[in-house]
Image (spheres, rainbow, N blue to C red):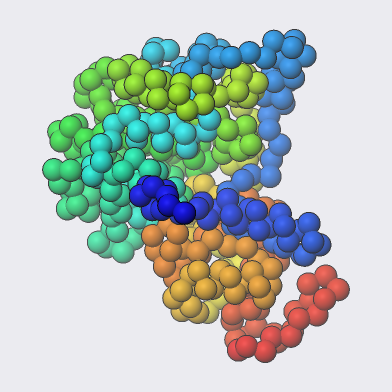
Amino acid sequence: MSFSIIGRSVAESVTLKLNETAAILRAKGEPVIHLGIGEPKSKAPLDAILAAASLLNSGEVRYTPADGIPALKQAIIRYTVDHYGRLVTPENVIASGGAKQSIMVALQAILDPQDEVVFPAPYWVSYPEMVKLCGAVPVPVHPEDGTFYPRLQDIEQVCGPYTKAIIINSPNNPTGAVYSEEFIADIVEFTEKRGIYLIMDDIYHRLIFHGKKAANCFKYLKGSLGDSKIILINGVSKQYAMTGFRIGWAVANKKLIEVMTNIQSHQTSGPSVILQTAAAGAINGIQSGVESLRTTLENNTRVMMEQLHAFTGLRVHEPDGTFYCFVDFSVYDKNSTKLAYFLLEKVRVITVPGIEFGLDGYLRLSTCGSIKDITQGIERIKWAIDPNSPNELFIGERKLTRDWL
């Protein structure tokens, strides 16, 4: 059986596969702790649920404009004013089936085969595969100083005549790093001078700790948005805990949005009107849930950091935001895939291998779960790999004896 070159080159989403694995094991009654999932436990905002329910009750569930319903576009415009200080028009906005589709449609609109897309490593697992889907070439950049904070010179070194776009994700998945104002200012200036598209993936920009704030890319835009190659990406999945609603958006110049709309119209005809209505309800509704989630995640992160510091030899970077800790476990095993499957087999803890984010030896651990999940999950991991931990462990009524250290 033959498949296309692109089809053969694209791997499955590891994070989605892990969610499937967790569901299967739980259905079998296994005591799984999922420290790999990027999904808040909070419920969707009541304003979102009521808005969707009202539309359902009306029975008027119809086709929508391919780029989004007017109510959602107006909500996104208001959001952009409130959080970025930039008034945009409906023609500058497209709503999609999640921020992932917004990025995908943007890439399809700007890339030709063999174009290059640059992004700092560690990176979100989907960036390389999305670039490959366009027949283009992903170019990850590892900061030369070994930190999780890229510098402009790191980016400059890999940009060449085929570079079409740069993707910046801050706060970053998987590291939780928030890139500095100086770096964002530099990257905006650099892309403007070089005529390179700048895709700002800001999906976590309201989930930041310790009083820090995400840099606003529009603050450093010297020209008008009409002439800009900045593509601002956001959505409701993370900050409003609406992962299953699959609504994201892009803000960019009108001509690009028009091309993206044309592409999306043939892909999906636009997102569901019910889910768009819910998203508009969340954006326009009471915002206290976002701060409540942020506070919960900050506390969960603190607990996880305390647990991780009890290990011998781990290199742990404290996240600035998001709901992830990206931890160097290479002192125990440099093969992150092998280690992740070992932990799943031995103690039923799901983690995400660092190699999927471009850095082997690391595991991404999620702080989305309960404090109990975090403490018991880290306890199980420590028991499985740390020789200094006790030789026996109880998981519920089951007593495990370690015979591999």
Residue 151 horizontal/vertical position (percent)? 25, 51
Residue 142 showing in the rendered view: yes
Vertical placement of residue 73 versus 141, above or below: above
Quarter of the image that includes the C terminus = bottom right
Residue 237 horizontal/vertical position (percent)? 57, 36
Residue shown at 34% from the left, 60% from the top:
147
161 and 326: which is toward the camera: 161
Residue 400 horizontal/vertical position (percent)? 76, 81
In the image, 196: left or right of 49? left
In the image, 391: left or right of 320? right
Residue 302 showing in the rendered view: no
Name the quadrant containing residue 60.
Answer: top right
Residue shown at 22% from the left, 53% from the top:
154
In the image, 391: left or right of 118? right
Residue 15 horizontal/vertical position (percent)? 55, 53
Q: Which residue lies furthest to the right in this view?
A: 397
In the image, 73: left or right of 244? left
Residue shown at 27% from the left, 17% from the top:
226
Vertical placement of residue 274 versus 180, above or below: above
394 and 257: which is toward the camera: 257
Vertical placement of residue 37 versus 97, above or below: below
Q: How many marks?
A: 0
Q: Residue furthest front?
A: 1
Residue shown at 61% from the left, 46% from the top:
39
Name the quadrant containing residue 108.
Answer: top left
143 and 338: which is toward the camera: 338
